Image: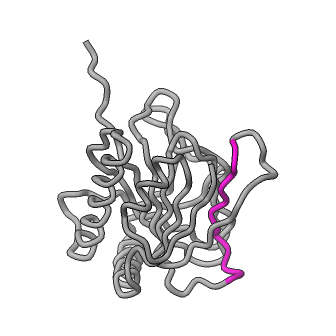
Amino acid sequence: MRIVRHRDVSIDAIAADIADGNVSVKSDFIEEGLVRTLRNEALALWSDGEFDAARVGIGDSKHLAPTVRRDWIHWLDDASLTDTQLAVAARLETLRSAINLHTFMGLFEWEGHLALYPPGSFYKRHVDVFRNNRERQVTFILYLNPDWTEGDGGELRVYETGDDISSYEDVEPRGGTLVTFLSEEVHHEVLTSQTDRLTWTGWYRTRPPHRY
């Protein structure tokens, strides 16, 4: 696994990175105007109390774990997206289709949320797939921080392997950047943020297995 950084490339190039098992980092996936509008919408939801403290685990085992993660999330409902969110969702749908063409993974939908990391927040090293639920196949993270500068923190630390914590690369959470990777393969963490760090984070999923 390696990190591949792009700027002026097509969505097919991102899909090819996924097919090769790499982490794809594309600058300017969406333009600054969309970044700022999405950020303003998210901050309005935050002000209205529409975010919940993020938990770890799944189902009945979900619980707060402030030593592991301290972000806040607002789940997105595909049926009630704003016009701006719909515009971005359309691009994410194009990417889903491209990944399917390159990998035959059978991704059929996305799920996602807005995530806000207030100052002092972090998310320790983890992978995005639960042991008893492997429907999440591909993770995408769209950064909504148009004014991010060095020292603001909140970098995404991507580990080259699951065993060696000394070998990693950091990705800056600059507005408009999209990071995409295989959910079950890539160990990663969010370093402590020094300012409000916002993302649209989601997963492309396969259908659940039939149970007889």
User: 165 or 153, which lies in front?
Assistant: 165
Q: Main secondary structure of the magenta part?
A: loop
Asked if residue 189 is positioned above or below residue 28 in the image, the reply reads above
Image location of residue 146, percent across then percent down: 49, 84
Instruction: Give the camera-side residue of 169 and 67.
Output: 169
Picture coordinates of residue 6 (x, y %)?
51, 71
The residue located at (61%, 54%) in the rendering is 69
* Image: magenta residue range: 150-161
Give the number of marks.
0
| Nearer-the-camera pick, 114 or 18 | 18
Q: Indicate whether residue 95 is drawn in magenta.
A: no
Asked if residue 196 lies left or right of residue 165, the reply is left
Location of residue 78 by image quarter: bottom left
Q: Where is residue 100 in the image (x, y as percent from the top left)?
A: 32, 46
**Residue appearing at x 23%, y 69% in the figure:** 86
- What residue lies at 27% left-to-right and 21% top-to-bottom? 210
Residue 151 belongs to the span the image colors magenta: yes
Q: Which residue lies furthest to the top in this view?
A: 212
x, y percentage for residue 139? Answer: 46, 52
Q: Is residue 81 left or right of residue 24?
A: left
Q: Which colour scheme is used?
A: one colour
Quarter occupied by the C terminus: top left
Give the farthest residue toward the right. Answer: 166
